[in-house]
C-alpha cells in the first residue's frame, strides 16, 4: 500500500489513465454496438484492433515516414495511416461477420457457437500475423514485438501550472481524437436515418424488420462502424506506444470489453465512461500496489460492478432514446 | 437371422447400441477398454502408424496417450458445464491450474508452503503432505473456487459469465506468477510428488520414464469418471440441467431451481478440472504459471464443442483429436494454432452441432435450423 506514491504522482497518473481509457473506450465501442444489435460478444474484435496497428506500420513503411520527417510529412502520414487503419479494421470486422457469423445466423445456431467461431477467427487473425505472413514475407511479421516509427514526435505543448504537469502533443491527439470520434458516432447513431435503423434493430429486431429496416444491413453497418473505431484506436495506440505485436489485441480487447460492460453494454456513452473509468482505476491501483497485478485490478472491478450493478454504470440502452 | 439384421439396418449406431443385448454391450465395452489399456504397446502395422514416436523428433507415445486421457477428463468435466448446463466457462484452465498447484504447494518439499509448515512445526526437511492427503486438498480447493466464482456470476446473463470466467483464469495464472513467496513465482515448483507405489528396477513405480503407468492410472480414473458422469446425466440433476440449457425461464416455472443446479454443474466441472490438473502436475513433477495460459481454456472449450456438446463421447472424441493430431504432426508445430483456428471456424460453420452430438441435441439443432429457414422464407 503506497498511497504517497499515488498522491505525489496523481496528476500524471490521471493523465495516463485518461490516455489509456480513451483507447479502451474506442475499442469498447465495437463490442458494445455489436452486442447491442446481435446480443453477441464479438471475440474477434480484439484482432480487428490488432490489424489496425499493423496497417499503420505498413503505411509508414510504404510512404517512408520516420521520426525525423518534416511537418507536412507528419500530418500527411498520420492522416493516411488513420484512414488506412480505419479501412483495414472495418474490412476485417466485416470479413469476420461474413465468414464466422452470417452462416451461423442462417442456420439459427445457438449463441455458444457464435462465440466459438469468433474465437476461431481471432486465432486465425493472430496467426496470420504471427506465422503465415512471416512464412511468406519474413520480418517484421512474427511472434516478436515490432517497433513502429514515432512519426509524431512527442513534444510538450504546455504545462499545467500549479501541478507542473507536462501535456504532450500525443496525449492531446489521443484524448481529443477519441472524444471527437465518440461524439461523431453518437451523433450518427442518434440523428441519422441509418442510426435510427441501428437503434430500431437493437430494440426489437422483428418489429424493426416489419417497419422496413434491413436487418442484415444494420448488422453489417455496426461491424463496419465498430471496426472503424477500432482502427482509430489502433492509430492512437501506435502514436502513444510506438509498438505492435501479433497478440497485442488480446489484453486490450479484454479490457475494452470490461469497459463496455462497466459502462453498460449496448450503451455508446457507457463505453466512454467505462473506458475512462477503467483506465484511471488501473493506473491508480498500479500506483498504490504493484503494476504486475494491473490485469487483476481490471477484473476485480468488473466482478464487483457485475455483482452490484449488472447493467453497468449508465445501463444498457442502445435501443433506447438515451443511447 | 437376416430378419434381425434387416431390423437393424437403417438404424443409427446409437439406436443399434441401445437395442443390442446386454451381453454384447458388455463384451464390446470390455474389448474397447482392453484395447485402450493395450494402446501403449501397439506395434502391429499398419495400426502402429498412429504412434507419435515413429520419427526421432516425435514425442513419447505413452506420454501423449497420458495427455490425451488427462484432457479427456477435462473434456468430460467441461461437458457437464457447457454441454449439459449450457454455461460458457472460458476460465476452465483456472481450475486445472488450481489442481496442479494444490498438489505442488502441499506435496512438494520445494514449495514455500511446505517449507513454512516444516519450520513452524519443527518437521524434518524431507516432510511434505502425503500424496493421499493432497488429492482431497486439490479437489476441495477447486470445488471452493468453483463455488466462489459461480455464486456471484451464475445469476448473471450467460455472456457475462464467459468474460468473468475468462478473467478468473487469468487471475489464477497472474497470482501464481506474482506470489513469489507462496508459489515460487515464474520459477515454478519442482519435486511435485507422485502417487506411492512399489519400486520396480530400482525406480519408483510412477516415474518420468515409464509413462505407460501414468497412462493406465489416468485411464482408470477416466473410466470411473465417465461412468459417474453418465449416471449423473440420466439422473434428476441431469434432466434439470437440460431443462435449464434449453429454456431457463420455462424450467424455473416448472419448479427447477436454476441457480442451484447451475452452481452444481459449475462445482462438479471445477472438481474434475482440478483432478485433471492434479494428474498433469504430478506426472510433470513440475508446475509453472506459463503452463496455464488462457489459450488452454479455448482449447478445452473447443474440444467439447467440436466433439459435440452434450455428448460425453463427442467430448472424448474432441479431446482426442485436438490433443493427438497436434502431437502426431509435430513437424508443423508453428502452424498448429493457425490450423486450429481454421478448423474451429470450419467445423462450427459446417456442423454447428459438433461431430458427434447427442441425439437430443442433434434434434434441437435440426429444429432451430428449420425455424431459421422458415423465418428467412417469411422475410
Image: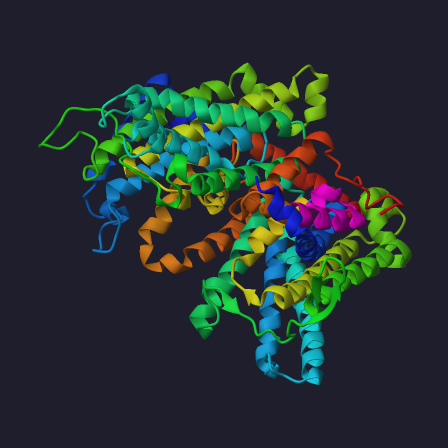
Q: Nearer the viewer, residue A220 or A238?
A: A238
Residue for point 60% across, 53% down? A252
Q: Nearer the viewer, residue B181 or B8?
A: B181
Residue for point 51% across, 47% down? A292
- Read off the magenta span: A259-282
Q: Nearer the viewer, residue B289 or B373?
A: B289
How far across and down, in percent of the image, does residue B285 sit? 28, 37
Total tally of numbered discs in the picture = 0
* Horizontal arrangement in the rendering, residue B235 relative to residue A258 (left or right): left
Residue for point 61% across, 52% down? A253
How far across and down, in percent of the image, does residue B25 sit? 35, 22
* Horizontal arrangement in the rendering, residue B337 relative to residue B113 (left or right): right
> Where on the picture, by quarter, is residue B32?
top left
* Horizontal arrangement in the rendering, residue B114 relative to residue A85 (left or right): left
Residue for point 21% across, 38% down? B208
Q: Main secondary structure of the magenta part?
A: helix
How far across and down, in percent of the image, does residue B87 sit? 59, 32
> Where on the picture, by quarter, is residue B237?
top right
Image quarter hosting the N terminus of chain B: top left
**Compared to B49, does B129 lie above or below?**
above
Q: Is residue B20 visible?
A: no
The answer to whether residue B113 is magenta is no
How far across and down, in percent of the image, does residue A322 sit? 88, 45
Q: Is residue A101 visible?
A: yes
Q: Which residue is at the far left? A: B201
**Compared to A131, does A45 lie above or below?**
above
* Horizontal arrangement in the rendering, residue B298 relative to residue B154 (left or right): left
Amino acid at each position: 500500500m503506497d498511497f504517497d506514491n499515488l498522491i505525489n504522482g496523481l496528476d500524471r497518473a490521471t493523465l495516463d489513465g485518461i490516455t489509456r481509457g480513451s483507447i479502451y473506450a474506442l475499442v469498447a465501442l465495437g463490442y458494445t454496438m455489436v452486442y447491442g444489435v446481435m446480443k453477441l460478444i464479438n471475440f474477434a474484435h480484439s484482432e480487428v484492433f490488432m490489424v489496425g496497428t499493423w496497417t499503420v506500420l505498413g503505411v509508414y513503411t510504404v510512404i517512408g515516414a520516420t521520426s525525423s520527417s518534416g511537418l507536412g510529412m507528419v500530418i500527411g502520414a498520420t492522416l493516411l495511416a488513420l484512414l488506412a487503419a480505419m479501412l483495414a479494421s472495418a474490412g476485417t470486422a466485416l470479413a469476420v461477420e461474413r465468414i464466422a457469423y452470417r452462416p451461423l445466423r442462417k442456420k439459427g445456431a445457438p449463441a455458444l457457437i457464435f462465440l466459438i467461431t469468433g474465437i476461431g477467427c481471432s486465432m486465425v487473425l493472430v496467426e496470420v500475423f504471427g506465422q503465415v505472413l512471416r512464412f511468406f514475407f519474413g520480418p517484421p511479421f512474427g511472434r516478436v514485438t515490432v517497433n513502429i516509427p514515432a512519426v509524431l514526435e512527442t513534444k510538450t505543448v504546455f504545462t499545467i501550472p500549479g501541478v507542473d504537469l507536462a501535456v504532450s502533443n500525443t496525449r492531446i491527439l489521443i484524448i481529443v481524437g477519441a472524444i471527437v470520434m465518440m461524439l461523431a458516432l453518437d451523433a450518427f447513431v442518434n440523428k441519422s436515418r441509418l442510426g435510427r435503423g441501428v437503434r430500431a434493430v437493437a430494440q426489437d429486431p422483428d418489429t424493426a424488420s416489419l417497419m422496413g429496416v434491413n436487418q442484415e444491413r444494420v448488422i453489417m453497418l455496426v461491424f463496419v462502424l465498430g471496426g472503424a473505431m477500432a482502427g482509430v484506436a489502433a492509430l492512437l495506440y501506435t502514436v502513444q506506444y510506438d509498438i505492435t505485436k501479433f497478440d497485442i489485441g488480446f489484453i486490450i480487447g479484454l479490457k475494452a470489453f470490461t469497459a463496455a460492460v462497466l459502462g453498460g453494454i449496448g450503451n455508446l456513452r457507457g463505453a466512454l465512461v467505462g473506458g475512462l473509468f477503467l483506465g484511471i482505476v488501473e493506473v491508480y491501483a498500479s500506483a498504490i500496489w504493484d503494476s504486475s497485478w494491473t490485469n487483476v485490478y481490471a477484473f476485480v472491478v468488473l466482478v464487483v460492478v457485475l455483482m452490484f450493478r449488472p447493467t453497468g454504470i449508465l445501463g444498457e440502452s442502445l435501443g433506447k432514446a438515451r443511447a | 437371422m437376416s430378419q434381425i439384421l434387416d431390423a437393424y439396418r437403417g438404424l443409427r449406431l446409437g439406436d443399434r447400441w441401445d437395442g443390442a443385448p446386454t451381453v454384447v454391450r458388455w463384451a464390446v465395452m470390455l474389448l474397447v477398454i482392453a484395447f485402450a489399456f493395450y494402446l501403449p504397446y501397439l506395434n502391429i502395422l499398419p495400426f502402429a502408424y498412429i504412434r507419435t514416436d515413429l520419427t526421432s523428433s516425435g514425442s513419447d507415445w505413452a506420454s501423449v496417450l497420458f495427455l490425451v486421457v488427462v484432457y479427456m477428463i477435462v473434456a468430460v468435466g467441461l461437458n457437464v458445464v457447457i454441454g449439459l448446463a449450457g454455461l460458457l466457462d472460458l476460465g476452465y484452465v483456472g481450475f486445472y491450474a488450481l489442481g496442479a498447484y494444490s498438489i505442488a504447494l502441499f506435496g512438494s518439499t520445494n514449495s514455500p508452503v511446505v517449507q513454512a509448515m516444516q519450520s513452524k512445526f519443527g518437521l524434518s526437511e524431507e516432510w511434505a503432505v502425503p500424496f493421499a492427503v493432497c488429492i482431497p486438498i486439490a479437489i476441495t480447493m477447486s470445488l471452493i473456487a468453483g463455488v466462489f466464482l459461480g455464486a456471484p456470476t451464475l445469476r448473471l446473463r450467460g455472456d457475462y459469465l464467459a468474460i468473468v470466467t475468462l478473467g478468473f483464469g487469468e487471475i489464477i495464472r497472474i497470482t501464481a506468477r506474482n506470489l513469489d513467496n507462496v508459489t515460487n513465482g515464474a520459477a515454478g515448483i519442482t519435486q511435485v510428488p507422485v502417487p506411492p507405489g512399489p519400486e520396480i528396477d530400482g525406480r519408483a513405480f510412477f516415474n518420468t520414464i515409464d509413462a505407460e503407468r501414468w497412462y493406465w492410472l489416468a485411464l482408470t480414473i477416466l473410466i470411473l469418471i465417465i461412468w459417474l458422469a453418465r449416471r449423473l446425466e440420466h439422473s434428476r440433476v441431469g434432466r434439470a440441467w437440460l431443462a435449464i440449457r434449453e429454456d431457463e425461464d420455462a424450467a424455473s416455472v416448472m419448479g427447477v431451481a436454476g441457480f442451484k443446479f447451475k452452481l452444481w454443474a459449475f462445482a462438479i466441472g471445477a472438481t474434475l478440472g482440478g483432478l485433471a490438473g492434479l494428474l498433469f502436475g504430478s506426472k510433470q513433477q513440475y508446475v509453472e504459471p506459463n503452463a496455464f495460459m488462457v489459450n488452454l481454456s479455448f482449447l478445452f472449450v473447443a474440444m467439447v464443442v467440436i466433439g459435440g456438446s452434450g455428448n460425453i463421447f463427442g467430448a472424448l472424441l474432441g479431446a482426442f483429436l485436438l490433443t493427438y493430431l497436434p502431437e502426431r504432426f509435430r513437424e508443423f508445430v508453428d502452424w498448429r494454432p493457425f490450423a486450429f483456428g481454421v478448423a474451429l471456424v470450419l467445423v462450427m460453420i459446417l456442423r454447428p452441432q459438433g461431430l458427434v452430438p447427442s441425439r437430443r441435441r442433434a434434434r434441437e439443432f435440426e429444429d432451430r435450423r428449420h425455424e431459421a429457414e422458415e423465418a428467412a422464407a417469411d422475410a
